[in-house]
Amino acid sequence: MTGMIRAGHAYFTYDDEAEVIVNALEDVSLEISSGEFVAILGHNGCGKSTLAKHFNAIFTPYRGDVAVNGINTKDEDKLYDIRQNVGMVFQNPDNQIVATIVEEDVAFALENLGVPPKEIRERVDEALRTVGMYEYRDRAPHQLSGGQKQRVAIAGILAMKPQCIVLDEPTAMLDPKGRREVMKTIKRLNRDEGVTVILITHYMDEATQAGRVVVMDRGKILLDDEPRRVFSQVELLKDIGLDVPQSTELIYELRKAGFPLPQDILYPEECVDALQKLMEGRYGNH
Amino acid sequence: MEIIKTEHLSYVYNQNTPYEKVAVDDLNLSIEEGEFVGIIGHTGSGKSTLIQHFNALLRPTSGKIYIDGQDMWENEKEIRKFRFQVGLVFQYPEYQLFEETVYKDIAFGPKNMGMDEQQIDRRVREAAGFVGLKEKHLEKSPFELSGGQKRRVAIAGVLAMDPQVLILDEPTAGLDPYGRDRILNQISLYHRAQKKTILLVSHSMEDIAKYCTKVLVMNQSKVFLYDTVEKVFAHVEELREIGLAVPQITQVFYDLKARGFHLNDNVYTVEKAKHELLQLLRGETDA
């Protein structure tokens, strides 16, 4: 395990003529190891997208540093190395698809990089198989559902063989089925292909599937821990305008009412088990 | 009194071509005035096609629609009035803002309706109030606002026409939990204050459970269920079979019941779940 992405005391601000300078990132330090699956949570304007854009040198900090595989993102000569290693997927699939045929879209970046045609063919096919869209390779993007389009966008990134993928609310515009497809794809990439995944999301149920959750507020990192520990901070999360899963909230409320229940319930099945035990009186005399 | 009624409503896309697709299939539905209806269903279930009929963006391939008792397409020349009577807020409506100021953008609808300055002014301020926009926002450019604020401006633009029916297609898509709660709370307040009929298309069962009085479930171009929130979410198995879910908390209660606990059937919010369990647990303590 090595520090694939490292941010050290990073500060960033958007230029705004009239207003007082507000730091979009303030003293952010973070290390993400190769192979991790990290979810970043926070309300709109908390700095999470700004942070994500530092991971592939779209932005660079005005103070502090961000490094990818040991390369400082301020090193302009290495920009291509960084961007090839860290791919980004954005919210709206329609804004990311440029070609009129699925496989041409996936090949787009490779053609720009001057990869030999035979290798392009192989990489495109492999990427499309990985996201489960190989059968759709000769379709037009407008014939696909939102979830399918988003998977094509992911394939386009995968074809570049990045070590890390950063996804900025990739499911925000999708219906529940599309969301499930994309989440399944992301998890498989992380588990089977060893790709480091950084997922920015508003959906708490998606964050619970990550190995680590980073919560941001006003440009700072507020929490950085495993999902179970992060979501046990019900008050804190609600204070900064975030949700917790309904199961977690119910158990929290019952604990507050004085019932002895475990603090770290995350999934509905655990909630059912805990409530069953409670009602059967296994936790003592209540 | 029913505000929306359909009789054998059908809509076919690309009729008489190889791409023909029935999107709404022989639909009979009647929605009472003052309801807050949540509409759920997969992409492609026909829900968007259906709502576009209610303000005359689509004309039925066959069948009839009545708005407040009036046959919508009886006199084609009068179709415009239904567009004022039924307000439709599209997905990502903030992309439709175009005026120089928030005020002018909200005033666009009432102006089109031919109102005088004074009336327009009243409508604009009222509508801005309903969505929680402040006086100081009105003279700003819509593009200076945050995403959530822009969306509230767009909704105010429809409210300013004072429609009898307000339809919102996924009004919270892409917003964070705070922005989402804010918009839904404002809509809920508006519903209670104005007693207007509201149709809300949403993928979130939790939101529908929290705010709506009734749920319309669309599946394969037909109405799968239309009933009160309690009754619809009691169909845990059937909803799962068509690939939809009930709120997480409803699922928890369903599973507990399956394990032999006697619990109330209609729990679909955390608040209600807590109440129910406390009653049960404390009741047992007393006994």
Image (spheres, rainbow, N blue to C red):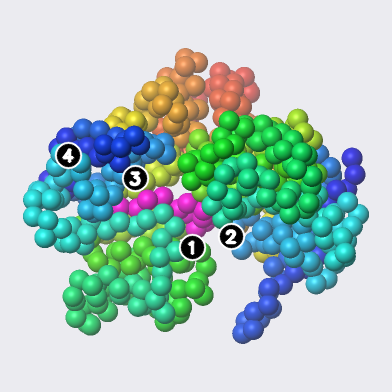
Let me know if residue A207 is in the magenta part.
no
Q: Mark 2 sits on what residue?
A: A44
Whole-number angstrom distance, CA of label 3 to CA of label 2: 28 Å
**Chain designation of label 2:** A
Whole-number angstrom distance, CA of label 3 to CA of label 4: 17 Å
**Quadrant in the rendering for residue A79:** bottom right
Which quadrant would the N terminus of chain A be assigned to in this image?
Answer: top right
Give the x, y percent position of residue B8. 16, 35
Q: Are marks 2 and 1 on the same chain?
A: no
- Closest to the observer, A43 or A196: A196
Three-letter code, disc 3: Ser
Three-letter code, disc 4: Ser
Three-letter code, disc 1: Gly
**Chain designation of label 3:** B
Q: Secondary structure at mark 1?
A: helix
Point 82% across, 57% down: residue = A80
Q: Mark 3 sits on what residue?
A: B48
Q: Are marks 4 and 2 on the same chain?
A: no
Three-letter code, disc 2: Asn
